Amino acid sequence: MNLTRRLVTTFAASLLAFNLAQAQTALEDVIKAKKINIAVLTDFPPYGFVGNDLKSQGLDIDMANYIATKLGVAVELVPTTSANRIPYLQTRKADIVIATLGKNPERERVIDFTSAYSPFFQAVFAAKSLSIKSFADLAGKSVGVTRGAMEDQELGKVAPVGVDVKRFEDNAGTISAFTSGQVQAIATGASVAGNIMAKSPQLNTEYKLLLKDSPNFIGVAKGEDKLRLKVNEILAAAKKSGDLDKMAMKWLGRPAGDLPN
């Protein structure tokens, strides 16, 4: 019996060591392939979107290119949606995810995060003529939100009984629903709302209620500590040199500021 137990324990330890070793190959694989696959959103300006030249651009795209350059490898941008960001890491479709990803306990159980790389906050926005001074005022009103996004989770925590939450599969659908009048309010990031205000001034959109102040982090597959720490080194240097502030100023009109590690 003791021998059996020792054999089982030894096997379990060996299996764990093997799994940990396997989980630490991402950085080496990237360097060996001379390419890193980075999942990004392409419908979420100014973080990630397709420009008039049909090329992806935005703060997250600049960040993806920046990290690839610092690693000395090419970058393959992998378009994703809010709902697929974490599955893309888990299924190895992407080495890292740079897609306005907020950090919370639920996500930390299934993926790892680097330091924050850019500011972001979620809020409810609506026309100035619509009186919304508290979450209770949302009762009887329709609010559009992207399914699976941070705004969806946060809205669910505070939405009163009687609010009509309409969920859409991607950010483009959510924005379209709001700008076309399908919903009265939109729960989204401040940058997205700012883009709506700039492109559709006739809507008289304004900030109403804060959902969450949530900086963006880069997602890494669980256990890929070597890759995560390497990206953290790049981010720390970019923060010190002012490169993070420059990117934020370029796309958000404000510096990155004192982001959490």
Image (spheres, rainbow, N blue to C red):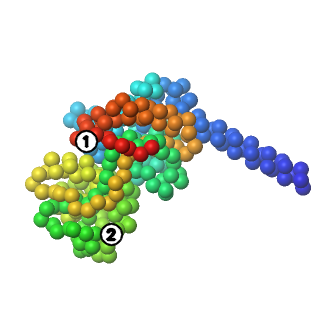
The vertical placement of 251 against 140, above or below, is: above
Furthest-bottom residue in view?
Answer: 161
In this picture, is 237 found above or below 191? above
For label 1, the crowd category at 10 Å Cα-Cα, with few meaning under 14, some 14 to 19 and many 20 or more, is: few
The x and y percentages for residue 196 are: 19, 50
Q: Where is residue 6 in the image (x, y as percent from the top left)?
A: 84, 49
Residue 254's label in the rendered image is: 1
Give residue 123's quadrant in the image.
bottom left
C-alpha span from label 2 to label 1 = 30 Å
Q: Name the residue under label 2.
A: 159
Quadrant of the frame with the N terminus: bottom right
Count of numbered labels shown in the rendering = 2
What secondary structure is found at the residue carrying circle 2?
loop
Can you give x and y, in whole percent of width and height, for residue 150 in the image? 37, 56
Question: Which residue is found at the position 65% from the left and 37% from the top?
Answer: 21
Task: Report whether 65 appears left or right of 20.
Answer: left
Name the amino acid type tagged 2.
Answer: Ala
In percent of width and height, residue 236 lies at 43, 34
Residue in the image at 49% along x and 42% along y = 220
User: Residue at 23% across / 72% down in the picture?
Assistant: 137
Q: In which quarter of the image is the C terminus?
A: top left
Give the residue type at disc 1: Arg
